Structures are given as structure tokens and as C-alpha cells.
């Protein structure tokens, strides 16, 4: 899916749509990409002379990727995140980097969904964590 197709599933819009493309590569597994352009709002003050993508934004990129694991429900429902656990930041992400996220569905029970996601740049792990959300 390209950026316009993603808008058919995700309710996010600019400047908070943080995926450029995504593909459900098998049931329960999604791969998504986002290139850090350098003009994003979150880089203006983080940090003016040394731009680094904030960790919370890396978590949001992973969260949007995880939502696509239940994309069949997304036209009618929204994802409200209830937990971000076991998050670890391993390497910095900077302008020009292309983030690659692999999201895996761990468990689903009714409207509650638990996923694991890993975000890497150039094959180097930058962030990983477990994300849970409710479909409402």
C-alpha cells in the first residue's frame, strides 16, 4: 500500500501520518517504511543543531504499523493504544534515514490487540517494543 492507500485504513493525516508504504506480508505480520525527510515538525526543536527523531515518534511509527495488522477492522474502528511495554531504544534515527518496521500480531481477544514491533534503519535495530490497543 502506498501513502494514499494507507489513508483508507489509518485515520492519521499529515503531519501525523508516519508511514510511506506498508504491506501485510503474511497473516499476522506487516512490514512498513517511512523515510525521515528532515522537515517534519518534531525535528524543529529536537534538536535544532543536531536533529534526532524523538523516541515517542519512533513508537508512533511502530504503532501505525501495528494497526495495519487488523486493517480489515479499521474502516469502521479506531485504534486507541492502551500500552507500550518493554520498549528499548538502540540507535538514533536521523533525517535521511528510512525506517523499516516489522510488526507481528502476538494475541487478539475481541477488541484487544497485542503486537510486537521492531524498527530498524539499514539493518540496524533502532527501537523495539510491545504495543497493545483496543479497537473502538
Image (cartoon, helix red, strand yellow):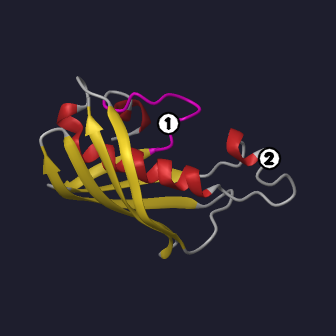
Residue at image position (59%, 32%) is 15
The magenta region covers: 9-20
Q: Nearer the viewer, residue 120 or 76?
A: 76
Along the horizontal axis of the image, is 51 left or right of 113?
right
- Please identify the quarter of the rendering in which residue 30 is found: bottom left
Query: Where in the figure is residue 128, as x and y percent of width and height?
Result: 43, 67
**Residue farthest along the top direction in this orientation:** 76
Which of pointers 2 and 1 indicates the residue nearer the eye? 2
Residue at image position (36%, 45%) is 82
Quarter occupied by the C terminus: top left
Q: Earlier in the sequence, mark 2 or mark 1?
A: 1
Circle 1 Cα neighbour tier, 10 Å, few/some/many (<14 / 14–19 / ≥20)? some
Q: Which residue is mark 2?
A: 45
Query: Where in the figure is residue 14, as x and y percent of width and height?
Result: 56, 29
Q: Which residue is mark 1?
A: 17
Residue at image position (62%, 63%) is 93
Q: In the rendered view, tell whether residue 98 sits above or below residue 6.
A: below
Q: In the rendered view, tell whether residue 60 sits above or below residue 74.
A: below
Mark 1 lies on a secondary structure that is loop
Query: Where in the figure is residue 36, as x and y percent of width and height?
Result: 61, 52
Q: CA distance from mark 2 to mark 1?
A: 19 Å
Amino acid at each position: 500500500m502506498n501513502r494514499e492507500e494507507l489513508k483508507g485504513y489509518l485515520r492519521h493525516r499529515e503531519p501525523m501520518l508516519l508511514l510511506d508504504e506498508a504491506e501485510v506480508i503474511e497473516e499476522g505480520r506487516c512490514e512498513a517504511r517511512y523515510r525521515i525527510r528532515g522537515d517534519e515538525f518534531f525535528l524543529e526543536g529536537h534538536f535544532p543543531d543536531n536533529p534526532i527523531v524523538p523516541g515517542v515518534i519512533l513508537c508512533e511509527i511502530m504503532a501505525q504499523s501495528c494497526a495495519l495488522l487488523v486493517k480489515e477492522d479499521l474502516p469502521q474502528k479506531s485504534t486507541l493504544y492502551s500500552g507500550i511495554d518493554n520498549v528499548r531504544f538502540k540507535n538514533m534515527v536521523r533525517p535521511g534515514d528510512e525506517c523499516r518496521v516489522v510488526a507481528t500480531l502476538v494475541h487478539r481477544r475481541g477488541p484487544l490487540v497485542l503486537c510486537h514491533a521492531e524498527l530498524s534503519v539499514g539493518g540496524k535495530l533502532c527501537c523495539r517494543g510491545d504495543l497493545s490497543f483496543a479497537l473502538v
